Image: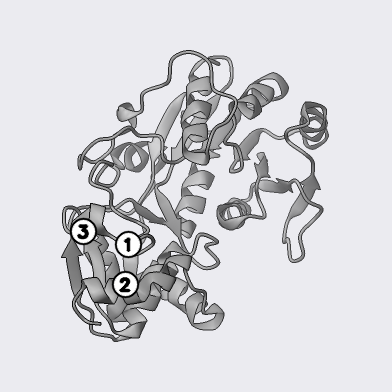
Amino acid sequence: MTRALVIGGAGFIGVAACKELMRRGVETIAAGRKERPYGTFTSYVAFDRDDEAELASAIARTEPDVILDLACYQPPQVEAMARAFRGTRYIFVSTGVYPSLHGRPAKEEDFVPFDGEPPADLDYREGKRWCETVLTRHPDLPWTVIRPPAVFGPADHTLRIAAYIERVADGGPLLVPAETYEKQAGVSWVKDIGFACALACDLRKDTTHKAYNVAFEGVSLRDLIEGIAHALDKPVSLHPIPFAELPDGASPYGPDPARSAGYIIDRARRELGFEPSALEDALAETLAWYRVARPSHPGYANRAKELELAGSA
């Protein structure tokens, strides 16, 4: 039986991944910095991954065949993993690594590693790109990369999906970027990402030193918003304006015209057997959570300005 250590296993994507791994008969151990969270449904170990001795000790105790790493975004964490892990597969979950593609869908080959040494202070997106750069410098580490774009689903701590739901629910017009709202958007469902992570843990598949895009295919921002409106049985009016004129938080998924227009998922489909779910299923589950939790995205505080820009104030 394969044994998997899931770092970040009690988090948003981690819970989905652990459930799918256990469904497939994988011995699954979740890991995180804090003590066992309330409600954790699988074996759990706590350690500070930035303490290399603690990391090595946790790996030695659990003896995983596979490490699924959902929490890494600093290059020294990759270096420590390369020194400590001697198992069969290290799966790094990444995002935001593609350069400006100006509306072209992203292929895995579009990732370009950095030159030189990583800076000491990195934000999340640049940290992920540097981590992938460091992975390419470790040919002896059996790494695989899973690349989702923005992930939504119940309990999404970013609340980006809630930004669209609450605007549809209030019945007013939604500001969307005129350049890109009908192009493919970079979005994915948390269950699909958990599913893709579990597929990558299948040691019968040869995924060593490969990256895989996983996302919805062909779903635009317009499709997403109209899907929400259909599920809520609400009319919706989209108001396109230039991306540069969007108020902060009005459209947290963008899409930014300088970024890619979604991801090409052909490799994941062909080599992993990944297939994205129906958007309707993802929205139904997400809306069920929203109806109970009623979260609000911080950008909704600017709603009056949005309505003024749309000519509805």
Quadrant position of residue 278: bottom left
Disc on the earlier residue, 3 or 1:
3
Q: Secondary structure at mark 2?
A: helix
Q: Nearer the viewer, residue 212 or 176?
A: 176
Above or below 258: residue 36? below
**Which is more N-terminal, label 1 or label 2?**
1
Name the front one of labels 2 and 3. 2
> Could you tell me if the residues under marks 3 and 1 are in contact, i.e. CB atoms within 8 Å?
no
**Which residue is pictured at 80% across the width and 46% down the height?**
46
Residue 119: % across, % down: 55, 23
Quarter containing the N terminus: top right
Q: Count neighbours of disc 1 (C-alpha within 10 A) and say few if under 14, some if 14 to 19, many if 20 or more.
A: some
Given the image, on which type of amino acid does mark 3 rest? Tyr
Q: Is residue 260 left or right of residue 164?
A: left
Quadrant in which the C terminus appears: bottom left
Q: Reading the chain from its start, which is encountered first: label 2 or label 3?
A: 3
Which residue does the image show at 29% across and 66% down from the upper left? 224
Q: CA distance from mark 3 to mark 1?
A: 15 Å
Name the residue rendered at 24%, 63% in the picture: 176
Look at label 2 and name its amino acid: Lys
Q: Position of residue 215 (x, y in %)?
A: 36, 50
164 with respect to 37 (left or right): left
Determine crowd level at label 2: few under 14, some 14-19, many 20+ residues with C-alpha closer than 10 A. Answer: some
Q: Position of residue 82 (x, y in %)?
A: 64, 21
Marker disc for residue 181: 3
Secondary element at image label 3: loop
Label 2–label 1 contact, CB within 8 A: yes
Regarding residue 205, the answer to whether it shows in the image is: no
Q: Which residue is mark 2?
A: 305
**What residue does disc 1 label?**
247
Assess disc 3: are there few (<14), some (14-19) or many (≥20) residues with their C-alpha within 10 Å of its C-alpha.
many
